[in-house]
Image (cartoon, rainbow, N blue to C red):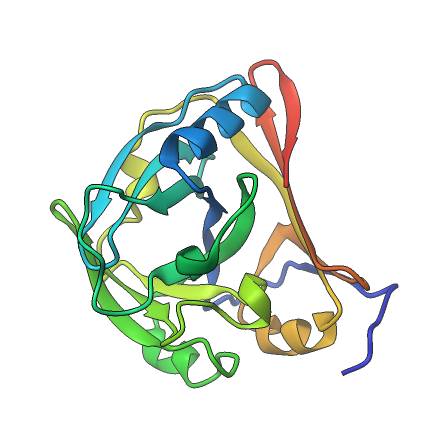
Amino acid sequence: MPVSSNLETNFCDNKSMLELDHIVISAETLKQGTDYVADVLGIVPVAGGKHPLFGTHNTLIPLGDIYLEVIAIDPDAPAPAQARWFGLDDFSGEPRITNWVCRTEKPRRVIGKTLPGTGEMTSVSRGDLKWQITVSKTGTLPFDGFGPAIIDWLGCPPPVFAMPDLSCRLETFSVEHPHAITLRSFLSGLLSDKRFVLRGSEAPKFELNISTPTGSKTLR
C-alpha cells in the first residue's frame, strides 16, 4: 500500500457508528507509566483496577468524553492462558502510546468491517465493570497497534462519565502511519470526531494533545 505523506483527514460527519473511547499508554511497570503521565500533565492518574483475564492493571485520566489509560502487566497476577492484549507480552522501553480504542453501540454492524487481525469480541471485566472488546490471538492489533480496538460497553454509559473530573480535556489525537489510506478507508463513514486526525507518514506515530489546568500538554 503506498504511503500518502500529505494525506490528512478529520473525521467529522454526524452519522458515526464509532466514537473515540480511550487512548492506551503501555509501560513496563504501572508506576513507570503513571509517573510519565503525571510528569507531563502535572496531574496524577486515578487508580483503575486489575484485569484478571489478561493479568494486567491500570490507572486512568478522564479527558471529558474519553479517557487515557495507563496499562502494564500486573506482576502479582498469574500468567494468562492467552496472549495479553495491547501487545504487552512484547512491550519494552519507555512508556508511550501504543493503542487506541473506539466504542460502538452497534457491534454487529461494525465488526464485519474491521481491519484483518482485529480479532473477535472478548468478554472482559474489572470489578463490577463488564464489557466486550476486540482482542487478536497474538494480542497485537493491526498495523502494530495503529489500527483501533473496538469496545462495546453493553448498553451501559462509558465509565469515563463516572470518573472524577481532573479538568483535563482532549484537544487533538493524531495517528500517522504508512498505511493511512487503509486506515482511512476503514474509518470513513464510521468515526466522526473533529479532534481526530489521520495522516500518511513514513514513520508511524501517535500524538495526543490535552488541555490541563496549566496549559496544553503533549503525550506520545
Residue 215 position (above or below residue 16): above
- Image quadrant holding the N terminus, namely bottom right
Residue 119 in sight in this render: yes
Q: Position of residue 218 (x, y in %)?
A: 65, 32
Left or right of residue 160, residue 185 in this image: right
Residue in view at x 64 percent, y 72 percent: 183
135 relative to 52, above or below: below
Residue 60 in picture, x, y percent from top left: 37, 35
Q: Report whether residue 168 is seen.
A: no
Q: Nearer the viewer, residue 72 or 125?
A: 72
Above or below, 128 against 211 in this view is: below
Query: Residue 140 appears at what percent x and percent y?
Result: 46, 67
What residue is shown at x 55% (from left), y 47% (from top)?
A: 97
Q: Nearer the viewer, residue 152 or 52?
A: 52
Q: Residue furthest right?
A: 6
Quarter that holds the C terminus: top right
